[in-house]
Amino acid sequence: MITVLKAGWCIPIITDKVFQYDYGQRICIKGLHGVGDTVQVHYSYQKTGGTAVSVVGVVQDGVVTAQIPDTFMENDDPTENYKIYVFVYPVTADPASAETLVRLVIPVQSRPKPEY
C-alpha cells in the first residue's frame, strides 16, 4: 500500500517506489476532508494529454483508499522504469465545476516478468 499525507493540490506528491508486477497495490491519501464518501481516482502513464483510467476511491475519516489497476503494474512489460500519474477528483453533480484535489506520481521499478 502506498500511503501519503495530502499537501497542496498544485504540487504533485512523489510516493515511495513500487516494483513492477507487485499486484494488488492500493493508494491511501490522508487529509482529504469535506469531499464526500467517494472520489474518482484517475490513473495514467502520461503527465499531460492522453487518457486516464478512472476508479472509485472510498473516503472515510478524511482518508481516501483506492485500488491501483493491476494493468498499471504490468505496463506492457517495459524494460525501463516508469511512472504512474494519479489525479484525485471529487464526485460532484456538475463535473464541469470540480477541480483536481491531489496529484501523485508513483515511480515504478521495472523488473523481469515472473513466470507463474
Image (spheres, rainbow, N blue to C red):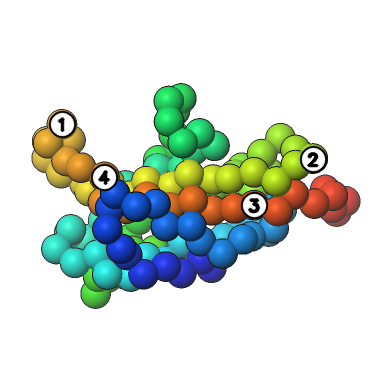
Are dots 4 and 1 in contact, CB under 8 Å? no
Precedes in sequence: disc 3 or disc 4? 4
Are dots 3 and 4 in contact, CB under 8 Å? no
Q: Residue at x 49, y 51 (%)?
A: 105
Whether 5 is drawn above or below 94: the answer is below
Are dots 3 and 2 in contact, CB under 8 Å? no
**Tag 3: amino acid:** Val
Q: Is 67 in front, or is 3?
A: 3
Precedes in sequence: disc 4 or disc 2? 2
**Tag 1: amino acid:** Ala
Quote the CA–CA distance across marks 1 and 3: 32 Å
Label count reads 4
Q: Which residue is mark 1?
A: 96
**Tag 4: amino acid:** Thr
Quote the CA–CA distance across marks 1 and 2: 38 Å
- Determine crowd level at label 3: few under 14, some 14-19, many 20+ residues with C-alpha closer than 10 A: many
Quote the CA–CA distance across marks 4 and 1: 11 Å
Whether residue 41 is visible to the viewer of this picture, yes or no, is: no
- In the drawing, what numbered circle is on residue 108? 3
Q: Residue at x 43, y 25 (%)?
A: 49
Quote the CA–CA distance across marks 3 and 2: 11 Å
Q: Which residue is mark 4?
A: 100
Q: Residue at x 14, y 63 (%)?
A: 34
The quadrant holding residue 62 is bottom left
Q: Which residue is mark 2?
A: 79
- Is 95 left, or right, of 54 in this rendering? left
Quote the CA–CA distance across marks 3 and 4: 23 Å
**Tag 2: amino acid:** Thr
Precedes in sequence: disc 1 or disc 2? 2
Is disc 2 placed on a helix, strand or loop? loop
